[in-house]
Amino acid sequence: ETGVTQTPRHLVMGMTNKKSLKCEQHLGHNAMYWYKQSAKKPLELMFVYNFKEQTENNSVPSRFSPECPNSSHLFLHLHTLQPEDSALYLCASSQVTGTGKKLFFGSGTQLSVL
Amino acid sequence: GQQLNQSPQSMFIQEGEDVSMNCTSSSIFNTWLWYKQDPGEGPVLLIALYKAGELTSNGRLTAQFGITRKDSFLNISASIPSDVGIYFCAGQLTGNTGKLIFGQGTTLQVKP
């Protein structure tokens, strides 16, 4: 148990569906992240939130819409996805510090887009 | 852009053998992190390094922060079947951004 909980663990959706991924951290951190992990590719940073404010968007398509209502919760809203969006989506949290930043990851949501 | 080169990409070893993997970059880092990821799970932090030359152990795992601050090494001694997984390095860049860069991962398989 890393203190970061993601739901659902698995998700299958059609290209016209709308779904949301949820992440909750119980570590008292103030930064939260969404990463995408595709087979045979490095972890791709998607979004960063510091103190509920989005500080980074790595040119992510608008069909992915993040939401961070508070420092403990992070959502990723999905709509009109493409099959190539199938991947493991990982949430992580950390303290917002200039050095010594340690990310703690959730177990991920394995997403399949049909 | 910044990049981490992690090697080897994969390893297939006999139980009981020692394992070494490393990450190198042209950029300078102020933190190195090593993670392990089991199938279907998220990466779990194994070791964190904060100073050049630092050598830190976690059980049978030992990691070092290279003195040039551009590389790091992870060693696993006397491997066991549950060491199977993907190992990632991550380096935090110096400067205000503190951006974390991940390596491509080393897939370890252990034959009993």
Image (cartoon, rainbow, N blue to C red):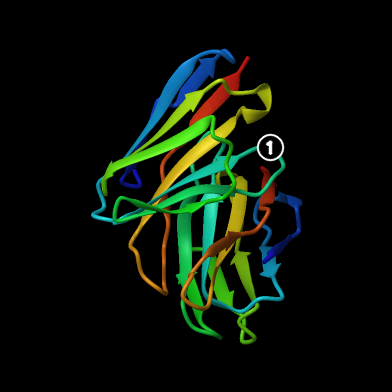
Using the rendered image of the protein, determine whether residue B58 is visible from the camera's viewpoint. Answer: no
Using the rendered image of the protein, determine whether residue A32 is visible from the camera's viewpoint. Answer: yes
The total of numbered circles placed on residues is 1
Q: Is residue A77 left or right of residue A28?
A: right
Residue B55, above or below A12: below
Residue A101 at x, y = what percent? 41, 66
Q: Considering depth in this image, is B55 or A64 the residue closer to the camera?
A: A64
Residue A105 at x, y = what percent? 43, 47
Q: Amino acid at mark 1?
A: Ala
Residue A70, above or below A98: above
Q: Is residue B19 left or right of residue B30?
A: right
Q: Residue furthest front?
A: A62
Which residue: 74% across, 52% down? B11
Q: Is residue A111 left or right of residue B6?
A: left
Local crowd size for mark 1, using a 10 Å CA cut-off: few (<14), some (14–19), many (≥20): few
Residue A12, above or below B98: above
Which residue: 57% across, 36% down? B39
Q: Considering depth in this image, is A84 or B91 the residue closer to the camera?
A: A84
Residue B27 at x, y = what percent? 66, 76
- Write down the chain letter for disc 1: A
Which residue: 54% across, 34% down? A62
Q: Secondary structure at mark 1?
A: loop
Which residue carries the number 1 mark? A39
Quarter of the view holding residue B66: bottom right
Residue B78 at x, y = what percent? 61, 60
Quarter of the view holding residue A21: top left
Which residue: 68% across, 48% down? B107
Quarter of the view holding residue B19: bottom right
Q: Quadrant of the C terminus of chain B?
A: top right
Q: Quadrant of the N terminus of chain B?
A: bottom right
